Image (cartoon, helix red, strand yellow):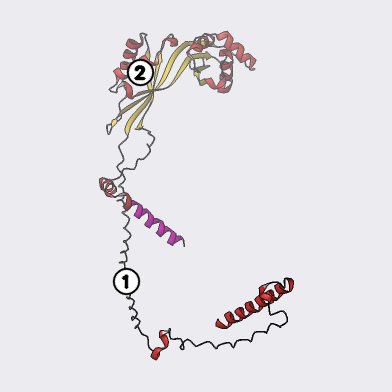
Amino acid sequence: MARFLLTVLMGFVTSRQVWAQADCDEDPELDLCEDNTDKPMPMPMPMPMPMPKSDCDADEVDLCDDDEMSTPMPAPMPMPLPAPMPMPEPMPMPTPMASPTPTTPAPVQADTTTPTPAQVTSFDTEMELDDVTKFDTDKFKEAMAAASSVSADKIKIGKVEYKTKVQYSMPTSVDRVAAQKAIAKACNVSESQVEVAIESRRLSEFRRLATTIAATITAQAASTVSSIATKAADAAGLKQAFQEGGLTVELTVAKQPKNAVVVSTMLTGEAGAPAPEVPPASTIQSQVSAKVGIEVVATTSNVSTGPQNTTAAPTTTKLSEKSVDDAKGQTPSTLLACAMATLVALFLDAA
């Protein structure tokens, strides 16, 4: 550093002399140029550059005196070591919960007791009366309840038909089919509505043939019975019907037509009790005459008894009291765990 400063100083002095000489050349009257006009200005001798002292040659430096420090440096304070962090205690592993065992509800004991069905008595009641349009099924039901030991709510009225019965006689024989066709044509009904029973016998005293035709004509409407009875009583009309069928006969009406109502009735008894009995015809006749208000002649037929034909009701499953109590004691979490365990078991079985 000292060498650098010395070089700069020498450069400055030289530059100042050059500038002064230049001024003297321009203005010789300057005092600065007296006695120096003819004399050349000597060049300054370069000064020797002193060698820089080492750091230890300087007196000011205390570091080099006896290689010891005048003032002892304080010993560095030891850095305190950080306290060791305590290791965290391991968390205890949670004890796995045991899967709850699904509670299987107790099996429901089905009621295998078969109730004894009620016994039913079915029969037909035929009642002869002049005007069948006066017959009333509701009043007949009341009359039947009064005639029997069965209440009206256990009496069922089935099919109701109207019949016209007539009988013919002729001296010649005729087959059943020909007689059925002729009677159906004469009464303006279908052949299926006509039932014919033919009886032929010979009269012993004259050895003559006598044929009897018993015909029953069935109608579904009471309003048609009167017209059928009128046509069935016309012997000429029936003879004409036979002739159109290719038969010539001489016939007479042996018994005039009579109208009747045939009612199918069912009496239902109590469960476990015997089947109700059919009321006597005379009792039915008197009760119907009193309830309906007309005179009738009653007969019964086609009697049958048997158990009531009931349709099985839908079976309702009823849990036992124990199963209901078990279900009530389960919490939602327990029920959920049971459901999850069941799903896992199903998944493992499927895998």
Front in this rendered view, residue 181 or 22 = 22
**Residue 248 appears in the picture as rendered:** no
Front in this rendered view, residue 205 or 86 = 86
> Is the stretch drawn in magenta largely helix, strand or loop?
helix
Crowding at label 2, few (<14), some or many (≥20) Cα neighbours within 10 Å? many
Which is in the foreground here, disc 2 or disc 1? Answer: 1
Q: Is 338 within the magenta?
A: yes
Judge from the rendering whether residue 151 lies leftward or rightward of residue 11; answer left or right.
left
Q: Quadrant of the N terminus?
A: bottom right
State the SS at label 2: helix
Residue at left offset 38%, top offset 25%: 123
The CA span between labels 2 and 1 is: 106 Å
Q: Is 125 within the magenta?
A: no
- Which amino acid is tagged 2? Lys
Where residue 83 appears, as percent x and y from the top left, is: 30, 73
- Chain part drawn in magenta: 334-351
Earlier-in-chain disc, 2 versus 1: 1
Residue position marked by numbered label 1 in the rendering: 85
Where residue 337 appears, as percent x and y from the top left, is: 35, 55
Q: State the image quarter where residue 292 is shown.
A: top left
State the SS at label 1: loop
Residue position marked by numbered label 2 in the rendering: 141
Q: Which residue is situated farthest in the bottom direction here?
A: 66
- Which amino acid is tagged 1? Met
Q: Is residue 334 above or below residue 55?
A: above
Front in this rendered view, residue 222 or 166 = 222
